[in-house]
Amino acid sequence: IFELMDGFLKNDPTSLQNDILHHVEYTVARSRFSFDDFEAYQALAHSVRDRLIERWHDTQMHFKRKDPKRIYFLSLEFLMGRSLSNSVINLGIRDQFADALSQLGFELEVLAEQEGDAALGNGGLARLSACQMDSLATLDYPAVGYDYANQYGLFRQVILDGFQHEHLDFWLNFGNPWEIERVHVTYPVKFYGTVTDELLNEENGKVWVPKRTVEAVAYDNPIPGYGTRNTINLRLWAAKPSDQHNMESYNTGDYINAVVERQRAENISSILYPDDRSYQGKELRLKQQYFFVSASVQDIIRRFKDAHSTFDDFPEKVALHLNDTHPSLAIAEVMRVLVDEEHLGWNRAWNIICNVFTFTTHTVSPEGLEKIPVDLLGSLLPRHLQIIYDINFKFVEELKKRIGLDYNRLARMSIVEEGAVKSIQMANLSILCSHTVNGVSRVHSKLLTTKLFKDFYELWPEKFQYKTNGVTQRRWIVVSNPSLCALISKWLGTEDWIRDIDHLIGLREHAANGELHQEWKMVKKVNKIRLAEYIEAMSGLKVSLDAMFDVQTKRIHEYKRQLLNILGIIHRYDCIKNMDKNDRIKVVPRVCIIGGKAAPGYETAKKIIKLCHAVAEKINNDSDIGDLLKLVFIPDYNVSVAELVIPGADISQHLSTAGHEASGTGSMKFLMNGCLLLATVDGSTVEIIEEIGEDNMFLFGAKVHEVSALREKGPALKVPLQFSRVVRMVRDGYFGFKDYFKSLCDNIEGGQDYYLLGADFTSYLEAQAAADKAYVDQERWTEMSILSTAGSGRFSSDRTVEEYAQKTWGIQPCRCPF
Ligand code: 26V
């Protein structure tokens, strides 16, 4: 038995080769004497998966035995990206696999490229969930992530003639070796129907008679920690038709329609909503939310009941985290189960609710808050609507006692919003029922407590906290930048920073060391070469490695101001065109890289993408400009592309109008990779400044407290001539598509400039000029780059998760001993 403690599988090169060949032959079903890169990847992935499964079993058994308080992380989005490299690194067997493969004639890196990108999410919120799972596993926390299983991930962005087109992302077409289908872990999820008035007991239990049932089947994705045997679970629910589904139609002989109807059930989990701007009250979205919530809650309660006989222990064993309001129907669902099915009585159930839920919001504006029309909720989930009404009734009564009859405030705080469309304010429900409400950066938290949720803050200041976001150094340095990883370990004399980020600060003392500078520059060069090759393969454009690689990659949103970047590029182009020879020599060459997806229905964002291409077309083909300026749009930006782009960047731009970015996490990845930041003082940048120092960054723009006064000026707001000039160039058709770009120009001129591009333009250009100046002094630049990495430790998701564990969830590590 002791020999088997480490698992059945051995990690010496011969055993690994045997395993891979075994999977080639029996899993992939190709001859072990003849298989290509993709088949090798599949076999390799299965060999890694076997090792993950062993650890996963051990971890689950250990958790079961110890029965610690668990954190259930409920999120409708996880942007996991690829799993292979991350898994072999976290399992500590990367080099062994690389050796085994090379003896078989394959290269690990090449095979890793064969993997598709798991894009079950939109942007920041979704990648944050993925980073936090990695940290939860690494720090040995007993965590389970829950989501629903999308058949299609976020759309693939295809650019034709400079326009974005959306293609379906068939990410599962070639199978997914990283998930384990659990055919025996299924739960029925019920919809529609009626609630009978019959009282089950005197404490408000009711009977819901649903009309439709869909089956939720579990797909488990093991998430390995680094430097630990702990491997936690991300459980995704896929919808399958239920045996109980629409039985009547069979009986009435409408066989064909009954079958078609059954198939429809699967649609519930098939697609991811790609527009992260607003909530449209669509029935399918609500179905997805409840489908995932109901299955997860059943699973959580089943696990709890396996080990406990009374629900009084529930809050000591369960923390339920709401990643934004998307999963907040879980509140009504847990209440329903406790009252109607477990017959706990309203007050006991309510007490449990108030002690298990925690909530993080990722939004800054009132328009970004989720509202569910009452009619929709009432028809799909009639009992849940009743429960929410009851919660609200009691809340408002209590509130009246506390704040009196201030009807405006009562209306703002009520969970039920009266109005043209009566709806449920999911944030209000989440705040009321959670014992902790989190923002994602200090500035964000300030906006929450002084604006967005001011009324609630005044009532319960103790509920409000913030945990500045973080990203995992395992994915964002170790996986994506192996050369930098080796260099850091060499200079720190340890690899401990991979598990304990605080060590990273040790780089500071070497920041002026000439030898390190040489090696640091070399690493950046290697990564720039990799990126340049990618750009050439993708677009045919050759870029100069001597140029400053300037990157802005993120979802395209007006508030993120990619348009400001493009107008700045036009200005640069215009300046170069008008320079004489002597001045041209002094120009710091730039390769400007922009990437990101626009929501399919977001016209303005799509126009910004087109403008980027139109400007690129002009500049890149202007022989007068040569290598002094290039503009590249990187299509289909996703986690895998980010892994390639971020390490190759010299500078990155984070241009949100102050007060609009809740946190921003891209900046943290760039920072870790020694990339300098050009940014507004917004979101987490405020805290980055504290760590890195203003002198090592390029800051610009109006501050959060200045924005509203600037906006109020409207047409009276002065904009610089340079701004009007570049906008005019776009207006006049200098880049073609005059009519198409007209609305973009109208949006930012004549007092319409909501995101203040004109107001910030001068200071933006100054920051850009400062960056050019700094780049000329390569030693100074390299020192700033080293200091960026050295100071990035605070932005590790390990720190974020540690804070959540201690201050919000009340959980302890539970480390698998063998
Ligand atoms: C909204 C919707 C609306 C309808 C359907 C799909 C969908 C998906 C997501 C969202 C909300 C997105 C909010 C979000 O991603 N916020 C970002 O969260 C990051 C992590 O906290 C933070 O760094 C960014 O500043 C913030 O914009």
Image (tube, rainbow, N blue to C red):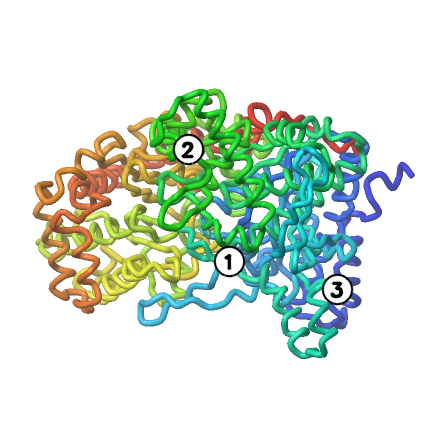
Q: Could you say whether the residue bearing mark 3 is in a helix, strand or loop? A: loop
Disc 3 or disc 2, which is closer to the eye? 2
State the residue at coordinates (37%, 38%): 364
Mark drawn on residue 243: 3
Question: Which residue is disc 1 drawn over?
Answer: 283
In this rendering, is residue 170 above or below 388?
below
Q: Could you say whether the residue bearing mark 2 is in a helix, strand or loop? A: helix
Which amino acid type corresponds to the residue marked 3 in the rendered image?
Asp
Which amino acid type corresponds to the residue marked 1 in the rendered image?
Glu
| Pointer 3 with pointer 2, Cβ within 8 A | no
Quarter of the image that includes the N terminus:
top right
Which amino acid type corresponds to the residue marked 2 in the rendered image?
Met
Disc 3 packing (10 Å; few <14; some 14–19; many ≥20): few
Between the C-alphas of marks 3 and 2, the distance is: 42 Å
Between the C-alphas of marks 3 and 1, the distance is: 23 Å
Between the C-alphas of marks 2 and 1, the distance is: 25 Å
